[in-house]
Image (spheres, rainbow, N blue to C red):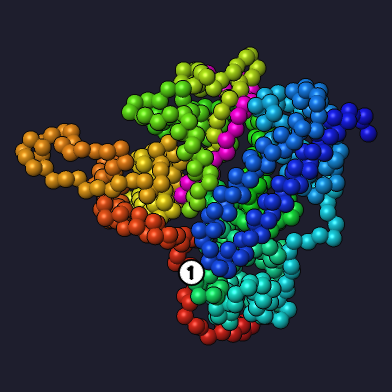
Amino acid sequence: MTNHSPTARRIAKTILNGFDAYFADFQNITLGAKARFETASWIGVHEANKERIDLYKVKVNQVLKLVHSVTSKDTSQLDLWRQAKETYGQLIANHNNYEIAETFFNSIFCSQFQHAHIHDSHIFVKSSRAPDEKPLRDYSIYISYNGRDGLEAMIEDILADYEFSIPWEDCTRDVGHICEALRAGPLAHLNGPEDEQRLRVDMLESVFYRNKAAYLVGRLMFAGEVIPLILPCLNNGRGGVFVDTVVYDNDSTSIIFSFTRSYFMVDAPIPSRFVRFLSTIMPLKEKSELYNSIGFHKHGKTEFYRHILAHMKVSNDKFVIAPGIKGMVMSVFTLPSYPVVFKVIKDKFDNPKTVTEEIVKEKYKFVSRSDRVGRMADTQEYTNFIFYRNRFSEELIEELKKLAPSKLEMDDKWIIVKHLYVERRMEPLNLYLDEASEQQTIEAMEEYGNAIKQLAAANIFPGDMLLKNFGVTRHGRVVFYDYDELCPLTECNFRKIPEPQTAEQELSDRPWYTVAEADVFPEEFRLFFSGNPVARQAFEEQHSDLYDYRYWQRLQERIRAGRIESTFPYRRKIRFQRLPIKRTPPRAES
């Protein structure tokens, strides 16, 4: 073992103790999710989400102060941190959550040096060991069930093993619904009870809580095929739980774990095990997304950074200006072979924008702590992101030098972007509509209106609702991604445009009435469709209520009264009917 100074060892031990304390507090907040679900404490759910997100920075600040207190030496010495990193790597060699502990060390170092001196000799740019290098023995996070006694009996056993403190509303009915849906869906090709007896289901023991739902997550296996099996459960508000639907297709599963959703609260003592399991039912999702989905978004950043570095080694395309109408606040670029965009705040905003850089940063922070209801992209914030200069197109370099010179450091080899946001790349809605068929336009406008309504129900007003500020995901969902003008819905003053009183007022091209900063006139939303009459007609046939100021005022009243709306990460049409149904007998063998 390398001989390191006592100071370096104290620093390493202090950071590891701080990580363990952070992880324990993270788990304790998470463990409260079950009681919040059972007592229908929906406001408590949102408060706990914010508390858990904020916890990381609080702990990093606390631990950095402790690091300074355990030594009288100069903590700005890089060699001291090199030794501390090596010692830390030895300390976490047998730690169950070594990879998240590495990220925590990185955060302490970056906080100490304001994200300078980023190098693998100082922090864990690369992980200290390969995944699965030391697999955990005798530790399982799931329970396996078989269909030996029939599909109904297996589903009954699964529901019985999830012990809520409130009873099932009608377990027999729910079992019938689930079996009926599975037999009509992924099990339709099976040949009766004999094949069903060969089924195996693995269910994660821990429940995934988010918003008003509890998700039972597992996988159904038959003849080498792995099928997602997710059972969203809801509280009926009268002290009972019911299964709302069953999700078993890959696309719907991916949407439930989407980057547009809030993070789950799930008791995951060893998160890497959960990520590994989830990868078996969502093989297209990167590890970074899965870590994000269960609340470890800081480690998700680490995984993303490592993944894009690996991608850079096997690709040769160049970063280019992102397609679409250029924004007034952000310069946006992308790597065509990689599915994200990088957003840099301009040094000077285009007219008529009046927001400041600090306001924009606050908006992004607001989004990170909000319920995104499947309609806003999760965004990761980076400081001093390092790129190879030869991977940047000259056009992009010139744009960044022109629009955001204060954010750049460059030499012949490197480009360092001092501050940027990274989010999933989507096709801008306005560009999507340019190529869309009539049916695709109708569906996109339904999605666009639903996105606005669902955000509003979550007390979020997008502000600038131009089509270019929304994107279309690979699943066809419409998502909002331009945050510089959003605000809580309850801060808006929705008004009807006053009727003109004179001919001069009627012919005026300027408002003849006073307009305060918070005033919003929903009648003007029609302007967002200028140049696209097909989209406008489709929107008005489905969402004309959004033009009525009274719609927005009623929504504000509900929010101020403490009402939290239900949003579902699956289609309403697949929700089970809650009328009692007869138990479905197994099909006879053909």
Is 531 above or below relative to 389? below
Judged from this view, the residue extending furthest toward the left is 503
Q: Look at label 1 and name its amino acid.
A: Arg
- Residue 282 in the figure: left or right of residue 329: right
Most foreground residue, 433 or 77? 77
Report the quarter where the N terminus lies.
top right
Tell me the quarter of the picture where residue 423 sits.
top right
**Residue at figure coordinates x 63%, y 73% from the top left:** 165
Dot 1 corresponds to which residue?
575
Question: Mark 1: which secondary structure?
Answer: loop
Question: Of residues 255 and 524, which is closer to you in this image?
Answer: 524
User: Residue visible at 44% across and 67% down?
Assistant: 573
Is 33 placed left or right of 395 in the picture?
Answer: right
Q: Is residue 164 above or below residue 515?
A: below
Other-residue count near label 1 (Cα within 10 Å), few / some / many at <14 / 14–19 / ≥20: some
Q: Which residues are magenta?
A: 375-395
Q: Position of residue 396 (x, y in %)?
A: 51, 22
Nearest the eye: 408 or 42 = 42
Q: Residue 556, can we see it?
A: yes
The percent position of residue 82, horizontal first and vertical second, equals: 81, 27
| As drawn, 260 above or below 212 | above
